[in-house]
Amino acid sequence: MDLIEIETKRQVSREEAADWLRKLADSLSRHNDIEFEREGVRYEIAVPDQLEMELELEIGDDGTSFEIELNW
C-alpha cells in the first residue's frame, strides 16, 4: 500500500477545536474508526481496540504546542 499523508493547518477558535476533538472521541468510541473528508475524498480508517497514544507539550518563548499522536 502506498503511503497516504494528509496534513491540515488552520486557525480555529478554542470552541471549534473542542468540538472537533469531541467528534473524534465519539467516532472512536462508537464506530471504532476515524472519518473525515478532504478535497471531496472521504476517508474512513478502522482503529483497533488497543493503540499507542503519545502526548507532547512544548512551552517556549515563541508559543505553546500540545500534540496528541495515536499509532497502531
Image: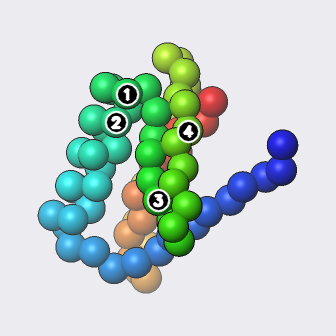
Q: Are marks 3 and 2 in contact (CB under 8 Å)?
A: no
Disc 4 from disc 2: Cα separation: 11 Å
The type of residue carrying mark 4 is: Ile
Indicate the secondary structure of the residue bearing disc 1.
Answer: helix
Crowding at mark 3 (Cα within 10 Å: few <14, some 14-19, many 20+): few
Compared with 31, 18 (above or below) is: below
Q: Give the residue pinned by disc 4.
A: 45
Q: Which mark is residue 31?
A: 1
x 47%, y 74%: residue: 9
The type of residue carrying mark 3 is: Glu
x 63%, y 30%: residue: 72
Total number of numbered discs in the rendering? 4
Compared with 19, 59 (above or below) is: below
**In the rendering, at what x and y percent does residue 53 appear?**
50, 34
Q: Give the residue pinned by disc 2.
A: 27
Q: Are marks 4 and 2 in contact (CB under 8 Å)?
A: no
**In the rendering, at what x and y percent does residue 57 appear?**
43, 55
Indicate the secondary structure of the residue bearing disc 2.
Answer: helix
Q: Is residue 37 left or right of residue 26?
A: right
Crowding at mark 2 (Cα within 10 Å: few <14, some 14-19, many 20+): some
Q: Are marks 1 and 4 in contact (CB under 8 Å)?
A: no
Q: In this orientation, which residue lies closer to the viewer: 41 or 2?
A: 41
Task: Compare marks 3 and 2 and give the one earlier in the sequence.
Answer: 2
The type of residue carrying mark 1 is: His
Task: Compare marks 1 and 4 and give the one earlier in the sequence.
Answer: 1
x 51%, y 54%: residue: 42
Crowding at mark 1 (Cα within 10 Å: few <14, some 14-19, many 20+): few
Task: Compare marks 4 and 3 and give the one earlier in the sequence.
Answer: 3
Answer whether residue 31 is visible to the viewer in this image: yes
Q: Are marks 3 and 1 in contact (CB under 8 Å)?
A: no
Q: Give the residue pinned by disc 3.
A: 37
Disc 4 from disc 3: Cα separation: 11 Å
